[in-house]
Each structure stands twice: as structure tokens, then as C-alpha cells.
Image: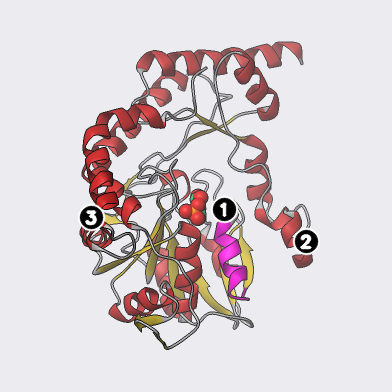
Amino acid sequence: MIPILDLQKQYEEIRQQTEQEVLKVLSSGRYILGENVKKFEENFAQYCSTGRAIGLASGTDALHIALRALDIGPADEVITVAFTFFATTEAISYVGAKPVFADINPKTFNLDIDELEKKITPKTKAIIPVHLYGQPVDMDPVVELAKKHDLFVIEDCAQAVGSAYKGKKVGSIGDAGCFSFFPTKNLGAAGDGGMLTTNSNYIAERVASLRNHGSHIRYYHTEVGLNSRLDELQAAILNVKLPHIDRWNSQRKEAAYYYNDLLKEYPDIATPVEMDDTDCVYHQYTVKIPQRDKVHEILKENGVMSMIYYPVPIHLQEAYSRLDLREGYLPNTEKVTRQVLSLPIFPEITREQQQKVANELIKAIETISVKS
Ligand SMILES: Cc1ncc(COP(=O)(O)O)c(C=O)c1O
């Protein structure tokens, strides 16, 4: 079976140094908010070219705490997309605000700017653009609209560490950037982890307090916060991995271009489209195909893992039935949800593996079209 990603292969490359660093933490007796977190925050801020980076327990918490730090709450609306992982909107709900969904551009899978503008109301306080699959959102018009309407921009960078828009790393463009170090992400920990990046010292200080029970000085609490700290073991592992991320992202990109080449003669397969002046990090390599569910099944039977990110758009999830948004509300999102299939991609994937994936994909589509 060709896996969707192979974490063990990556671990083998960095095993020795990782195990050394982990053992150092274990014998240090300092497991929370120590030197490793501090060092990783500094390194990560430098990597993203942001003034500050604050380590958190997850990407979900980064989004939640960003909204808290910007005082967004009940009575406010936050615009995002319904074609994302559920956590993006969960965070909006945690602070009691209303998620408002704008449709996507079906080519890039990301926020459609005209649709975004239509959803702005006097209650809108923030926009959460999601850099889905590692492809940056067209940020200039987002930032422009936000300025015009006095809105905050919180970038959901969970899938896009290292990607860049017009030479700027994601996470450095909006008021805050929210990253996930979930193990399957391009920069993954050995457990949960997250980061908030910002150029605002005010936001950084507020986030540092909120992650630590609303406290900067032990046992003195200025507000009710959360327990959401990146821990020392995860930070030690991430410090080992960070120097490799650009190379791993380039390897993903090379693999993506190789798939493009292998699939280019098949009009039934829409390969990913990159926007001009962006650097994509291919967290996923996602094609659009007809009869997606059948193809997905046939690939599995023939030894190729593929994934559907995401089978149900958020506005149609049971958890948001109270919003009463029906099928047809976001036509592009709904259509794309029925077409997308993500193929195996990871830095260590071999050309032979990719050839097998491409061959099986082409065969599956041809078999179905002959039958129907
Ligand atoms: C787009 C997006 N946003 C938010 C998250 C939440 O991150 P985490 O799993 O670290 O909480 C994820 C990943 O899981 C994601 O893919």
C-alpha cells in the first residue's frame, strides 16, 4: 500500500538528534515553558519574519486565543470559508461569535474575494483566510478590505508553514498567524502543538497571558485564560525539525510538479493551480476528478491510499445545523467537496511510488468511464 504520508521515513533521518534532545528534556526536570519553548519561539518568529511567536498547545487553540486576544465575542461575526478543517470555525464558536461563510474560488480552493466582500456587515469584526493545502490566499485584497472596514485578519496557516505570498511568509501578513504542529503537518510534532505569530507586541503579550491562565506573574491573574502551552518535549523536537523544513517543502514541491507532469495529458484530472507570485508548500496534492468516491475506492483496492479533504463543507455539518444554511448556499464549495481527492505526498515519496499512484488513478478513471 502506498501511504498518504510516511512519518517513519522522516523520523529515521532525524532520529539521533531528536532522541538526544528528548532525553535532555526528560533529564532536565523542566517540562513546561523552559528554554526549548523560548528557543523555538525565537527561531519560528525569525523563520516567519514576524516580531513575535508564542507557542501554544494546538492550532485550534492558536485560532481561539487569537480571537480572544482581539476581544472578539458574542454579537460579532467572523468571516471564513466552509472548505477547511472544522477547527477553523470551532474557534469562532468558542468565543461565542457567529461564523459567516464566504464561497471559494474553485481553482485555488481558497477564499473568493468578491464573495468575501458580499458577506461583510456592520457586525463583522474579523476575517480568517485559510491557506488551504499549503497554497496562500490572495492576501492583498483581503488586507485592503480589512483596512477599509476596520477588520482584523487572522491567517489560518495550519497547512501552510513556509509558504509565501509575494515574498512574504504566511503568518506575517495579517494581524496574527495561527499554525498547527499536528504530526501530519509539514512541520509536525510528536503530539499536538501550535503557534501564534504576530508583529504586535500587544497581541503577543495578551496571547502569552491567555495561554497561561490569564497570568504573566505566577498566581496573579488579570483575566480568565486557558491552559494552552506548547510543551518542552514538543518544542525540543520542533527545534530539531525546523532547519529541515525548507528542504522538505521543496521536496514536496518537486513531487507535486512530477505528478503534474504524469497527469497532464488527462483532461478528466484537474491538477492543482498555483497563483502567480506565491510559493506553495503542497501540504496536500489535491486533484479534482469525476466520480470521486468510486475512484477513491478503486485506488484503495489497488494499493494506493488517497484522502478526501473534506467530504462535508462546514455549513452543512450537523454541528452547525442551527445556522440553517442549506445545500446551494455555497455552490463552489459544495461542488468542489464532491470532486476533490488528495494523493500521497510527503518529502520522501519516490518517483516509482508516484508513477504507481498516477497509473492507478488514470486506470481507475478510465475503467469507470468505460462502464458508464
Ligand atoms: C486548516 C486547519 N485549521 C486548523 C487546524 C487545527 O490545528 P490542530 O489540529 O493543531 O488543532 C487544522 C489541523 O488540524 C487545519 O488543517
Amino acid bearing label 3 = Tyr
Q: Which residue appears at 66% of the width and 50% of the height?
A: 313
Instruction: Give how far apart the Cα atoms at labels 2 and 1 are.
Output: 21 Å
Amino acid bearing label 1 = Ile
Residue 301 appears at what percent x and percent y? 64, 15
Q: Which residue appears at 23% of the width and 69% of the height?
A: 51
Horizontal side, residue 189 vs residue 116: left or right: left
Give the dominant element type of the magenta stretch: helix, strand or loop: helix
**Sequence-first tag of 3 and 2:** 3
Instruction: Give how far apart the Cα atoms at labels 3 and 1 are.
Output: 29 Å
> Which residue carries the number 1 mark?
104
Horizontal side, residue 335 vs residue 357: left or right: right
> Which residue carries the number 3 mark?
47
Give, as a single range, the part of the protein colored magenta. 87-97
**Label 1, residues with CA under 10 Å away: few <14, some 14-19, many ≥20:** many
Determine whether 234 is above or below 282 in the image: below
Amino acid bearing label 2 = Ser
Determine whether 275 is above or below 219 in the image: above
Q: Nearer the viewer, residue 346 or 290?
A: 346
